Amino acid sequence: MNTGVVVHRSLPALLAERPALIVLGEAQGLSPATAGLAAAFPGRLLGLPAADATLLGVATGLALGGKQVLVELSGPASLAAIAPALAAEAARFARAEGFALSLVLRVPLSPGEALPAGLTAALGVDVYALARASEWPQLIRALLDKGQPVVLIEAVSAEGPELGGQPGAGRSLRSGADATVIAAGGDLTLALEAAEALSVEGVEVDVLDPGNLRAPALSLLAGRVNETGHVVYVGLAAQVAESVNAAAFLRLESPPQVCAPEGIASAVRAALAY
């Protein structure tokens, strides 16, 4: 199911159960995820004709006042534009004690879009990628309850069978002895499909979800790379490559591969042929 449809269906219950929740964006009435909800929840869905940095300032002020705030950005370019301001806010929050700042920045990701290299590290906050649209209600509640600013990357289309495990946490979705494929968000579907195709060729690969892209589950990721000696990072997961490569450097048997979702099988073959 389309992510926007799931968000639209889930927001009424979320707003009803959390009186302090505010949904903020540039044009809430035009967003498919929030269309038609403003009348049912007056004063709770706010559309501001403002630049992204101004939206962040308003959202931070609301959160400091005790609100839980969902901000809908227009895409990766908007996230990159506010990166310096978000990092500054995160640094201030890190120095403070005794209060929570419940703020989630939602960033839609269309097919073919990517995050600029190194962006997750520059943001200064935890970054998660939605792997399945059906996981959105559980994941968004968990992120709002963290009490700190976080970013949620939402693939516009995040469909597929249930993955199991805890959304937002590092998890192993498939085990294999030949290579390790690390993918995040909607790319996990293609990673699992590529793993099945490779299995027909006699090649068995891990498929791992890193969880937090800023602070990935290194014990899981590096542990498996140490076992297989070969690693392929898919799309969004390239954001965790530096930390995983450093942790598994001594056991790598081939150069780490970075590929687009459609090139997974070829990247695995290249790694194994090295």
Image (cartoon, helix red, strand yellow):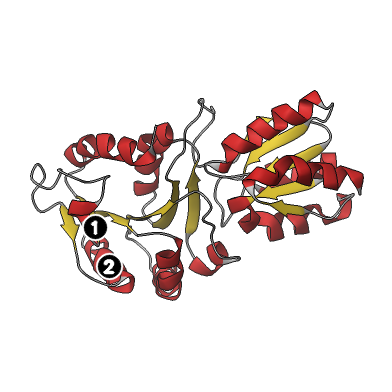
Q: Is residue 130 left or right of residue 42?
A: right
Q: Nearer the viewer, residue 8 or 99?
A: 8
- Residue at 77% across, 43% down: 266
Q: Earlier in the sequence, mark 1 or mark 2?
A: 1
Are discs 1 and 2 less than 8 Å apart at CB? Answer: yes
Up-down relation of residue 267 to residue 138 (above or below): below
Residue 4 has which mark? none
Q: Where, by quadrant of the figure, is residue 163 drawn?
A: top right
Position of residue 247 measured from the top left corner of the image (x, y, whole percent): 76, 55
Q: Which residue is mark 1?
A: 24
Q: Secondary structure at mark 2?
A: helix
Q: Secondary structure at mark 1?
A: strand
- Residue at 26% across, 39% down: 8
Position of residue 68 measured from the top left corner of the image (x, y, whole percent): 26, 53
Answer few, some or many: residues within 10 Å of disc 2's Cα (few below 14, many 20 plus, some between 14 and 19): many
Position of residue 207 measured from the top left corner of the image (x, y, whole percent): 68, 36
Q: Which residue is mark 2?
A: 55
Q: Nearer the viewer, residue 178 or 68?
A: 178
- Residue at 49% across, 66% down: 124
Q: Quadrant of the N terminus?
A: top left
